[in-house]
Amino acid sequence: MSESVINRIVGGPSGAGHRITFQRLDGTSSMTLTELHLAAERLARGLRASGIEEGDRIGILMPNCPEWVLLDLAAIRLKAVTCGFEPGKFAGDQALADRYRLAMLVTDRSEVARLIDVGEEAASDWPAPVYRPDDVTTIKFTSGSTGEPKGLAATAGSIDSSINAVQEMFAHGDGDNLFIFLPLSLLQQRYWIYSALCFGHDVTVSTYEAAFPSLRRASATVVMGVPAFYENARRHIEGRAARAGGLAPAARELFGDRIRYLWTGSAPARRSMLRFFTEAGMPIYEGYGLNETCIVAKNHPGAHREGSVGQVLPGKKVLLDADGLISVYSDHPVNTRYEYAAPGESERVFAPDGTVRTGDIGYIDEDGFLFIRGRADDMVALENGRNVFVRPLEEFLAGTPAIDQCVVLAHDSSNLAAVVSPADDPPDEEAIHARVAEANASFSPDERIGRVVIAPEPFSVDNGMLTAQFKPRRRRIAERFLLRLEAARDGI
């Protein structure tokens, strides 16, 4: 069995000279991984002196910053449990602390500095903890489309299994610098910091707002991003291509000239986007996973098939029912239930052994590559008995520069409708309707779009139309635009 990543990083970073850098719009800071470990050790002593004990929950409600990482690592040193809350989505008040039984809620970076100062004077004569595979390190929160986020306590074994499998595929090490920018409240973003401490490489932590200005300065070899980020990057590159002398030089202007590969997942990626970056000299590898499963499958060098999300990782099994509905069994499950959810929700998703009913539909080819056809919820049943998967339609519609994203849904039991997030302000309505007409001419009669509504502003996290991982909130979008769809006339 591979060494436990979590136990390994408690003892200190691997190798010397590797750094963690934080790039935000208000400045840049950097420290060696050795300095990071020592600061986290002092913070752990300060937390312990303030009364934090093994099993206590530490809430973190801050944007990406050094203090976020230090709190997370200090909690691991204490065998405390972190609860990462995304700013803007949660209020940092007593009600939050009470709801999630927090021993401490940290919302101010200066509070971390104070605790580090306390740790300078505190005793450090307690042994390093040893994590068993089923020990919980953090509670992560799903980005569900409605209601309060569900809490999911993640085990050390699930983290170890995922990071070790990724390391086997990509061999991150000396010379690498992994660039991350999504919120650290999303557990997978912390994987790459754990990887740096365990396997010895650099890591740069940014924010989504600062990602593009920071990329070239970061001199990254690997960028961890969601499809929406790369679609935006593609538009930047295409806009610069003529001046830069081609797509490849324009891509290097944006990303820097050290890129080894690009990582994407968390939402479906368009084949045209994946092909664009590969042809621009930056191979991009799509994968598949959920909060409830960690990483399930991943394309990687030497095992890559276009259109698939890769081969299934060691320690995972993908189970398909007669309709192609995917369930995932893990040797080390994230957990077997939600920590916070409506009654019956855990039983709906988790089998007693932790097997997860994903709600996705797909198939595995003869070489073991997993293909995702779409969500079961994305399948629209028409009154003629036909079932329509809307994902291919949505990808086709978004294949024009005028459309950023779109959601196709059933207007009634016999007709489809599209809600379009425009790429331009004001929207290019002529181009949008032309693309819908092209779709209607290309797809089957059952897939014809009868009504179109153009959103008054692009879908975003701020307006509630996208999740934190920039996936459309389909149900919320349908509810928001129901009246406009009812008022729209048939035809385009």
Image (cartoon, rainbow, N blue to C red):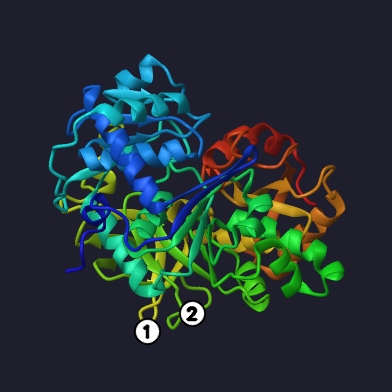
Question: Which image quarter is the N terminus in?
Answer: bottom left
Residue 367, numbered label: 1
Relative depth, front residue between 69 and 339: 69
The image position of residue 128, as x and y in percent, is 16, 45
For the residue labelled by badge 2, is the local secondary structure a helix, a strand or a loop? loop
Q: Which residue is painted at 57% across and 42% down in the image?
A: 466
Q: Which residue is painted at 24% across and 61% down in the image?
A: 329
Q: Which residue is painted at 46% across and 60% down in the image?
A: 202
The image position of residue 168, as x and y in percent, is 33, 73
Residue type, numbered disc 2: Arg
- Callout 1–callout 2 Cβ contact below 8 Å: yes
Residue 149, numbered label: none
Instruction: Kindly identify which residue carries mark 2.
Output: 305
The image position of residue 51, as x and y in percent, is 21, 22
In the image, is 317 to the left or to the right of 132? right
Relative depth, front residue between 14 and 140: 14
Which is nearer the N-term, disc 1 or disc 2?
2
Relative depth, front residue between 469 and 111: 111
